[in-house]
Image (cartoon, helix red, strand yellow):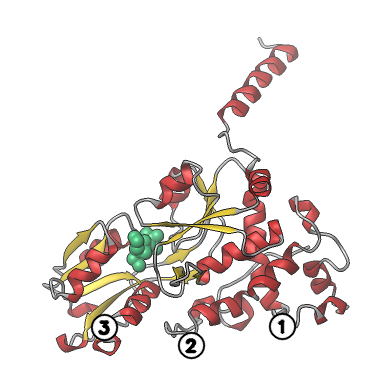
């Protein structure tokens, strides 16, 4: 029989083992970012609207803006971000090895990834789904007409499996042509080796904008999967995980409470307690996260709220012209719902 002392001893051993098992980065990410004076953010090499560098090396996009907001919250400067461009294959290793602090790169949240990469998904920044693009000259109007077609796609993504699942479920004889590099997949599509190219609908819109003649391409109406895209952080650092989650929530709540880049300073005198909490003019919520009371004010000031980020980068007046759709707020017909800042 185990007596109480023995039980406590065993529990102590178990605790020690747990502590030893934690990754070396545990709890340290915030300190590392602060002492380095820079957030290291893994992004897509080039995905119009989400992450792209201009000729001067200036990065922009929806995924990039999230990194800027995070840097503003932590370091009080949205420019203190080092962007590490990563392709589909490289992205998870870069996070696991500690090369980057956070991966903000059109990455779909799935059970397999959540459970097996040693990483945690921060949330969903863009609700997407997989679609198909074809050349208009082929006169294909629906994915159901892809029987016998060759479809180009990239490996190391969720895309490949969705394609085979869709073909099987719809009894379509689709031949996937899979490339390690996205340029190879799109190149094969443009040169006519494949009848269709498949990826996230946002990726299709991005690809169409950079095509030689965007009008020659049609994005088919079918969306064949759920692709909730969001940032990931390494496991084992709950503090940094919380900061990353709440910065995303603050961008969404900012929109919900009508806080824009332009009116933010004016709103500092608001007597709405929700706004006061977000902007830190009454209670200090930031200290609970290891930040300070102006964390969310700085994030919103740097990038604007979620709606502003969306419109600027991928919305109707941007080259991608994407509809808000599911990415509208929960009280405006969408599914964006941030837990409350209180
Ligand atoms: N959301 C999907 C697809 C993400 C993805 O990597 N898409 C491709 C096609 S748009 C891409 O960005 N490739 C660029 C690259 O690997 O450099 C996933 O997480 O697997």
Could you say which quadrant of the image residue 224 lies in? bottom left
Q: Secondary structure at mark 1?
A: loop
Answer left or right for 273 relative to 120.
right
Q: How far separated are the C-alphas under marks 1 and 3? A: 37 Å
Residue 228's x, y, as percent? 46, 65
Q: Would you call the spot at circle 1 few (<14 residues within 10 Å), some (14-19), or many (20 or more)? A: few
Q: Residue at x 44, y 47 (%)?
A: 94
- Look at 72% across and 79% down and name the residue there: 259
SS label for mark 2? loop
Identified at 33% across, 79% down, the residue is 210
Query: Is the CB of mark 2 within 8 Å of ligand 1?
Result: no
Q: Earlier in the sequence, mark 2 or mark 3?
A: 3
Q: Quadrant of residue 1?
A: top right
Give above or below for 331 relative to 159. Answer: below
Q: CA distance from mark 2 to mark 3?
A: 21 Å
- Foreground pick, 150 / 77: 77
Q: Is residue 169 visible?
A: no
Residue 342, above or below 191: above
Quadrant of the image where one finds ligand 1: bottom left
**Viewer-side label of 1, 2:** 1
Say which quadrant the C terminus sits in: bottom right
Residue found at the far top of this picture: 1
Pointer 2 residue: 316
Residue position marked by numbered label 3 in the rendering: 212
Structural distance between the alpha carbons of marks 1 and 2:
20 Å
Task: Give the mark nearest the N terminus, 1 or 3.
Answer: 3
Q: Nearer the viewer, residue 239 or 47?
A: 47
The crowding category of the residue bearing disc 2, from other C-alpha atoms within 10 Å (few below 14, some 14 to 19, many at least 20), is some
């Amino acid at each position: 029989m185990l007596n109480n002392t023995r039980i406590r001893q065993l529990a102590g051993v178990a605790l020690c083992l747990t502590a030893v098992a934690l990754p070396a980065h545990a709890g340290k990410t915030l300190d590392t970012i602060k002492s380095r004076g820079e957030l290291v953010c893994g992004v897509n090499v080039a995905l119009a609207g989400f992450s792209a560098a201009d000729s001067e090396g200036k990065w922009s996009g929806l995924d990039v803006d999230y990194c800027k907001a995070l840097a503003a919250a932590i370091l009080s400067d949205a420019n203190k971000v080092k962007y590490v461009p990563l392709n589909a294959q490289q992205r998870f290793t870069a996070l696991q090895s500690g090369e980057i602090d956070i991966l903000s790169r059109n990455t779909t949240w799935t059970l397999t990834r959540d459970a097996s990469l040693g990483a945690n998904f921060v949330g969903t920044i863009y609700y997407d789904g997989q679609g198909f693009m074809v050349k208009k000259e082929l006169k294909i109007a629906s994915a159901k007409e892809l029987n016998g077609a060759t479809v180009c796609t990239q490996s190391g993504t969720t895309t490949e499996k969705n394609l085979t699942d869709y073909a099987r479920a719809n009894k379509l004889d689709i031949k996937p042509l899979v490339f390690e590099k996205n340029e190879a997949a799109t190149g094969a599509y443009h040169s006519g080796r494949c009848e269709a190219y498949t990826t996230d609908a946002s990726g299709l819109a991005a690809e169409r904008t950079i095509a030689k003649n965007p009008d020659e391409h049609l994005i088919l109406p079918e969306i064949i999967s759920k692709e909730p895209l969001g940032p990931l952080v390494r496991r084992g650092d709950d503090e940094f995980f919380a900061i990353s989650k709440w910065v995303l929530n603050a961008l969404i709540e900012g929109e919900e409470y009508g806080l824009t880049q332009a009116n933010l300073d004016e709103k500092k005198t608001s007597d709405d307690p929700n706004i006061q909490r977000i902007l830190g003019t009454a209670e200090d919520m930031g200290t609970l996260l290891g930040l300070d009371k102006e964390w969310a004010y700085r994030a919103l000031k740097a990038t604007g709220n979620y709606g502003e980020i969306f419109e600027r980068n991928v919305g109707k007046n941007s080259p991608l012209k994407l509809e808000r759709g599911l990415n509208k707020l929960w009280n405006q017909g969408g599914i964006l719902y941030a837990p409350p800042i209180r």
